[in-house]
Image (cartoon, grey):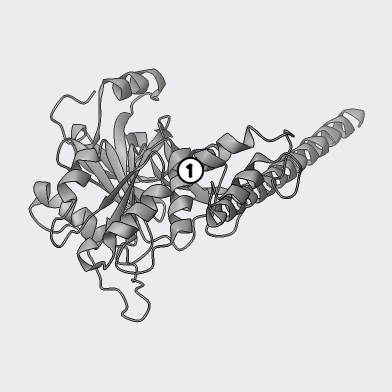
Amino acid sequence: MPENNTPLTEYGWNATLSNTFTTLAPPDSAPGRVLRVDRGRCDVAVAEGTVRALTGSDPLCTGDWVTVAEIRDSREPEMHTVTSILPRSSSIVRSSASGKSEGQTLAANVDTVVIATASDGDVDLGRIERLLALTWESGATPVVALTKSDAAQYISDTLAEVSAIAPGATVLAVSAETNEGMDVLDAVLDGTVAILGPSGAGKSTLANALLAETTGNNRLETGRVRAGDGKGRHTTVTRELIPFSGGRTLIDTPGLRGVGMWNAAEGIDKAFPEIEELIAECRFSDCAHNSEPGCAVLSALGRGDIDERRLASYRKLQRENAWNAARSDARLQAERTREIKVISRQLKSHYRGRDL
């Protein structure tokens, strides 16, 4: 078992994980944490350092706690394989970018999610709400970082606007260039921290500023945004787990073009608490909040108590989540049907053989 002050403890190894490992680990395996995954292989931090391992049959992602075993007959020296994945305390999941009816896990065992949004241009409130729902659903704590505040013209107004649509989340204006707000951001980050946002939001620059205390230099590549539309190119192409000050770890992620909802009903509720409170007051329990009599949501909208844009955003995320859930149910039903047909054919073949 790993002792204190080993490379693995830098990535969050603790007594709780040790007990889980002792209970669930296969024989002749050691604990580790996945640092990055690429093409069927991964880098895993273990007590002795970092090893290269085959990912095994179950889907892995950066941040996973795993068990690994050495492949003794491998052609490659010191090659390992992942033998199991320990239970996740949290996971950030979106609908698959490939369009398949399944979820894609972006990171696992994350405690804090920094939602990075560039404040020197048009701030997409709908995207922030979407990422907040994703974060709340994961079980992590969201922090909204309005980056590039030194270049923003109306940062106070933007800060107030974003704070209004992010109840329960910390919202900060920060600049990695001038260090404005960076001390406050650093103070609210805990455990494993993932930075999410679109390309050009300044995620890698923000990560470098946080890592500077530990590494003393820039660890991650950064790139300029296009002058025409403010969009950036993907300088981060993989998710990588990196230790930084205070016993914490950091995951910088590639820019997200799309963030689809996946089994995120609870996360959506937490992202729109004022609407959920109103829904409880509707006359009918199955109120669709369109034209039904006694709808508390529509009444609040008419009084100006809730914003029309925010209600539209809520409805959009709810529809999307329901649609993806239906697709998933259809896929699972199809898989069960195929399994039943296979078993049926096997039984028929078995009994035909007995009749002969």
Residue 199 picture quarter: bottom left
Q: 354 and 307: which one is in front?
A: 307
Q: Residues within 10 Å of mark 1 (few under 14, many from 20)?
A: many
Is residue 143 toward the left or the right of residue 175 in the image? right
- Please provide percent x and percent y for residue 40: 41, 52
Which residue is found at the position 72% from the left and 33% from the top? Answer: 285
Q: Residue furthest left?
A: 216
Q: Farthest residue to the right: give it.
A: 355
The image position of residue 284, as x and y in percent, is 74, 34
Horizontal placement of 6 versus 64: left or right? left
Task: Identify the residue under disc 1.
Answer: 271
Total marks in image:
1
Q: Nearer the viewer, residue 299 or 218?
A: 299
Task: Choose between 118 and 275: the one closer to the eye.
Answer: 275
Q: Is residue 202 visible?
A: no
Quarter of the figure with the C terminus: top right
What residue is at 33 percent from the left and 34 percent from the top? 69
Work out which residue is located at the far front of the displayed protein and give it: 303
The picture places residue 115, in percent across and down from the top left corner, at 35, 51
Q: Estimate the x, y position of residue 64 in percent, counting from the top left.
A: 37, 38
Please name the residue shown 29% across and 64% down the image.
154
Residue 226 position by quadrant: bottom left
- Whether residue 353 can be seen here: yes
Which quadrant is the N terminus positioned in? Answer: top left
Which element carries disc 1, helix, strand or loop? helix
In the image, what residue type sits under mark 1? Ala
Q: Residue at x 25, y 36 (%)?
A: 190
